[in-house]
Image: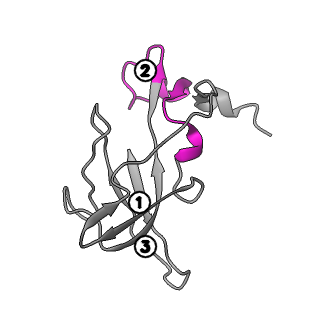
Amino acid sequence: MVVFQKAGDGKDSFQRPSSGITDSEGKFTVRTYEPGDGLPYGKYLVGIQKREVVGKPPVNPGEESSAAVNITYKWVIPKSYSEPAGSTLTAEVTSSGLTPAEFALSTGGKPAQIEIVGPRARANDP
């Protein structure tokens, strides 16, 4: 998933985020209000998220019994890129299109981060 948050000057109390789901080649189409409507002109902070479930996911993730199960994820793209405000990625949309057209991401040579989420993972949090 690619998330675009308008880079404001702090005067606007709300800026609607836009997002797109990547395909197997990393290409995406952005939606702001409805599928495929794109991004308004302007400058954006960008977050990119891709993680995979490690092992078997819950059989019926919507059921109460599965709510007590931890899920382990592997971040395919480093988690540091996941939030627009925390990543170093930026973009601009003009009449010429999106710049940059591609985002160069790096793991910095680090192995993929593993994250465990669920009630048991939170039980030992301070």
Is residue 27 in the magenta section? Answer: no
Task: Locate the N terminus by quadrant.
Answer: top left
Task: Say which of 80 and 15 sits in front.
Answer: 80
Mark 2 neighbour class, 10 Å CA radius: few under 14, some 14 to 19, many 20 or more: some
Residue 43: quarter of image: bottom left
Give residue 35's position: percent from left, percent from top.
19, 56
What residue sits right under mark 3 in the picture? 15
What residue sits right under mark 1 in the picture? 4
Numbered range of the magenta stretch: 53-81
Q: Which mark, by number, is residue 58?
A: 2
| Secondary element at tag 2 | loop
Measure the C-alpha gap from mark 3 to mark 1.
10 Å
Q: Height in image: 109 above or below 93?
A: above
Is residue 68 in the magenta section? Answer: yes
Give the number of the mark in front: 2 or 3: 3
Q: Amino acid at mark 3?
A: Gln
Mark 3 neighbour class, 10 Å CA radius: few under 14, some 14 to 19, many 20 or more: few
Give residue 6's position: percent from left, percent from top.
44, 69
Measure the C-alpha gap from mark 2 to mark 3.
35 Å
Give residue 74's position: percent from left, percent from top.
53, 25
Residue 28 is left or right of residue 62, and the answer is left
